[in-house]
């Protein structure tokens, strides 16, 4: 299995995963979307809200604001040693917002959220997001508690806004059938400009941009071109929301997948290794847990293959 | 509510911060499609969020009546009125 970065541009990352399988590629994609933790505002204590916006909507808008995530310092509240419902400094960050429109209509932006003085590194990714507009004399005062969460709990914790993969295209050209520079219909029709005519001969210029649409195959009068794909290699396109860098999301997802596979291996060997009565008891226990774990085990199997 | 969505409804990408520039440039007469391209809003889900948005809160705010002073002031006024009635 090999990974090669194709392009990295701002929030977008394209990389090639080769020598893999569909179950593995899909497990990785699903974990990146729904199981890599990120920070988002979860609980909001509203002290004063005289704006025209309802408290619930205000809290919802706050929750959707992406926050810079520090996975090395913070832990999920469920796994935190504090075991407190209110959270501690390891699993919670406080933001405060106090805004009042004095004279004219005032727009409150995400940058107005004051960060926790003890954790200044956790801040909003983008400060220009409008949260609410206040008319003269209206005021919003609140405390917002951010925590780590995953995309499967709520979409606001998804680290990515785009996470897709496609197969690596394989374009073969039948040289004797191809009319070369006298035809050029396939070059013309391709909307991604994958093909080019160089010195009279047809050439695959940008293979990775091919969307496998097959328009070139239909356009060729001689049937000289064939577009296929390699189902063991994948081109991923990721677009982070800014909380975590793209490469970190991939690494975290791989780590999670590995842990799942380890867990699965462990419980499987426990189950197979012990016979007799103890084994019977374990079987019942596993069945109870099994229902919840079913999906996860499936992903684990992908790795094993 | 009537304010621009923070994120795209379909894909979850951040769009809220692009609204003010989009609105300003549209009002200046620019072509909406070109502005969206400029702002880097590529997918049609995100484009539809900005294109179809109406900032209703601006209209709602026009009808907001500023609350009269604080409670003490208001009570003072009421007492004055009562005194006048007694006279």
Image: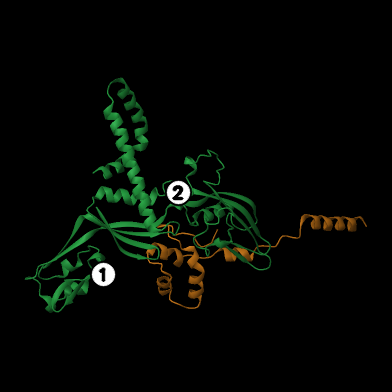
CA–CA distance in space, label 1 to label 2: 36 Å
Chain at tag 1? A
Q: Percent from the top left, x then y, of residue B74?
A: 79, 57
Quadrant the C terminus of chain A occupies:
top left
Chain at tag 2? A
The 10 Å Cα crowd at callout 2, few under 14, some 14 to 19, many 20 or more, is some
The chain in green: A
Picture disc at residue A282: none
| Residue drawn at the location 18% of the way across and 68% of the way down | A216
Identity of the residue furthest to the left in this view: A176
Question: Mark 1 vs mark 2: same chain?
Answer: yes
The colour scheme is by chain
| Residue drawn at the location 55% of the way across and 40% of the way down | A85
Q: Percent from the top left, x then y, of residue B47?
A: 41, 66
The chain in orange: B
Kindly state the secondary structure of the residue where label 1 is placed.
loop
Picture disc at residue A154: 2
């Amino acid at each position: 299995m090999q990974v090669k970065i194709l392009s990295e541009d701002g929030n977008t990352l394209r990389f090639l995963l080769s020598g893999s399988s569909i179950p593995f590629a899909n497990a990785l994609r699903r974990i990146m979307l729904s199981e890599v933790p990120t920070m988002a505002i979860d609980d909001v204590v509203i002290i004063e809200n005289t704006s025209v916006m309802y408290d619930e909507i205000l809290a919802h808008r706050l929750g959707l604001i992406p926050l810079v995530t520090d996975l090395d310092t913070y832990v999920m509240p469920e796994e935190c040693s504090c075991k407190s419902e209110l959270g501690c400094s390891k699993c919670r960050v406080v933001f405060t917002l106090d805004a009042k429109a004095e004279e004219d209509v005032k727009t409150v932006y995400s940058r107005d959220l004051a960060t926790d003085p003890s954790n200044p590194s956790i801040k909003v990714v983008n400060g220009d997001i409008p949260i609410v507009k206040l008319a003269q004399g209206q005021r919003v005062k609140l405390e917002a508690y951010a925590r780590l969460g995953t995309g499967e709990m709520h979409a606001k914790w998804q680290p990515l806004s785009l996470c897709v993969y496609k197969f690596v295209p394989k374009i073969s050209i039948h040289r004797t059938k191809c009319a070369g520079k006298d035809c050029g219909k396939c070059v013309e029709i391709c909307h991604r400009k994958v093909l080019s005519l160089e010195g009279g001969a047809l050439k695959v210029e940008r293979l990775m941009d091919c969307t496998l649409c097959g328009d070139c195959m239909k356009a060729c009068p001689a049937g000289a071109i064939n577009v296929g794909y390699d189902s063991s290699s994948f081109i991923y396109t990721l677009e982070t929301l800014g909380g975590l860098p793209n490469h970190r999301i991939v690494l975290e997802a791989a780590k999670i997948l590995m842990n799942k596979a380890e867990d699965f291996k462990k419980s499987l060997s426990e189950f197979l290794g012990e016979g007799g009565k103890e084994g019977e008891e374990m079987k019942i226990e596993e069945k109870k847990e099994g229902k919840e774990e079913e999906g996860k085990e499936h992903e684990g199997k992908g790795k094993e293959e | 509510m009537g304010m621009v969505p923070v994120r795209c409804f379909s894909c979850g990408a951040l769009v809220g911060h692009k609204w003010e520039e989009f609105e300003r440039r549209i009002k200046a007469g620019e072509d909406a499609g070109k502005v969206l391209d400029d702002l880097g809003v590529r997918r049609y889900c995100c484009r539809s969020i900005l294109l179809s948005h109406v900032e209703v809160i601006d209209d709602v705010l026009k009808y907001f009546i500023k609350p009269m002073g604080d409670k003490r002031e208001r009570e003072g006024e009421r007492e004055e009125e009562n005194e006048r009635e007694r006279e």
